[in-house]
Image (cartoon, rainbow, N blue to C red):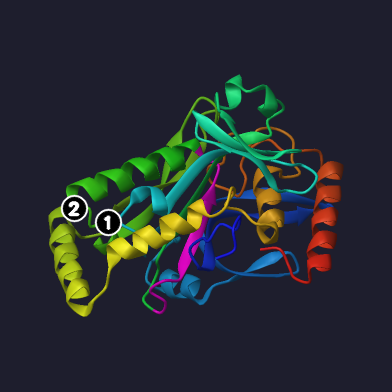
Amino acid sequence: MLKGLAITPPVVGRISIGRVVEKNGRRLPEKDDQFTLTTQVQQRGEWMLHPLDEKLRKATSGKLRSIPVRFLFNDPDLNLRAEYSCFDRETGRPVCVGNGETCRRAGDNGIEELPCPSPDGCAFAQGGACKPYGRLNVLIGDEDELGSFVFRTTSFNSIRTLAARLHYFAAVSGNLLACLALELKLRGKSTTQSYRSAIYYVDLCVRTNGTLEAAIIEARELDSRRKAAGFDQQALDMAAYAGFRNGAFEDSIEESAAVAEEFYPAESGDGGSHGDAHVGGHGGTPATSKSSLQNRLDRRAALLGGTAA
């Protein structure tokens, strides 16, 4: 295993509740009130829809506001990684990642471990470069039992709600989170910061028309079948833990363009929702700065012989 390279869950698609669109020569985050499933391929600046997106939409009479999911791991913190992250505005690469207690920061002397006072109390994070950043991996469908969809968010509401639900479901099921049949659900709320208009965040619930008791019974039966077949869930969790620990930062250079769009949309203002209901969803840099950043990222990706995802 290459040291310094975080080994993350294989990703076959993305989940978003918004998108980045080009308007008057600028790439801007556009809010949405439903989920969209895409592949990891872009055409003309747009993420291509995943075949499961159409399949799930056919199963609902309205907008896609719930997605049936399972999880790869029993450990909630392996399924959802949430950290304070500071990104270099020139490259889109992470330079400091912390949990409010300690952080790993890239400097002239390599990666250092330092105290993390959280963005509000950190001089290094001044200027809004450091934000909460969550990545949730889920399984959708049964075509690839180890291939996940990733939902990235900078929303306090989504991160806090998902973290609580994951830990609660793991507790009540007797640590059988990976066997529970659950669903991601889009919820709306109004806040003072959103000027009482609706914003959307992601929640995790028992599937529609199901009960928690029935989900737990089904999870125990699935766990028994897996064990009988030789499926080692504990070993899978340990392998994932070792993979994440193998690198200082989870995000790679190939993901830098997507991270730049999520964290630094070419839009003034705060988006009104701390990352809820659209990609990024927070204050950005001026259009000229974002445009030059995107150009640099595109050139760098071309030099590496691939496209950023």
Q: State how many labels appear.
A: 2
Q: Is residue 148 magenta?
A: yes
Q: Are marks 2 and 1 in contact (CB under 8 Å)?
A: yes
Quadrant hosting residue 237? bottom left
Tag 2: Cα neighbours inside 10 Å, few (<14), some, or many (≥20)? some
**Which corner quadrant holds the C terminus?**
bottom right
User: Which amino acid, mark 2?
Assistant: Ser
> On screen, 287 above or below 61?
above
Q: Secondary structure at mark 1?
A: helix
* Magenta stretch in the rendered image: 143-155
Q: Secondary structure at mark 2?
A: loop
Q: Residue at x 59, y 63 (%)?
A: 2
Q: Residue at x 87, y 43 (%)?
A: 288
> On screen, 119 above or below 91?
above
In the foreground, 245 or 15: 245
Q: Is residue 120 left or right of residue 45?
A: left
Residue 177 - label: 1
Residue 7 visible? The answer is: yes
Tag 1: Cα neighbours inside 10 Å, few (<14), some, or many (≥20)? many
- Residue 302 at what x, y percent from top left? 82, 67
> On screen, 66 above or below 88?
below
> On screen, 283 above or below 209?
above
- Residue 204 at what x, y percent from top left? 34, 50
Q: Is residue 26 left or right of residue 173?
A: right
Q: To which residue does mark 2 refer?
A: 173
User: Disc 2 and disc 1: Cα gap in Å?
Assistant: 7 Å
- Residue 194 at what x, y percent from top left? 55, 31
User: Which amino acid, mark 1?
Assistant: Leu
Q: Residue furthest top?
A: 121
In the foreground, 177 or 215: 177
- Residue 77 at what x, y percent from top left? 39, 48
Q: Is residue 245 magenta?
A: no
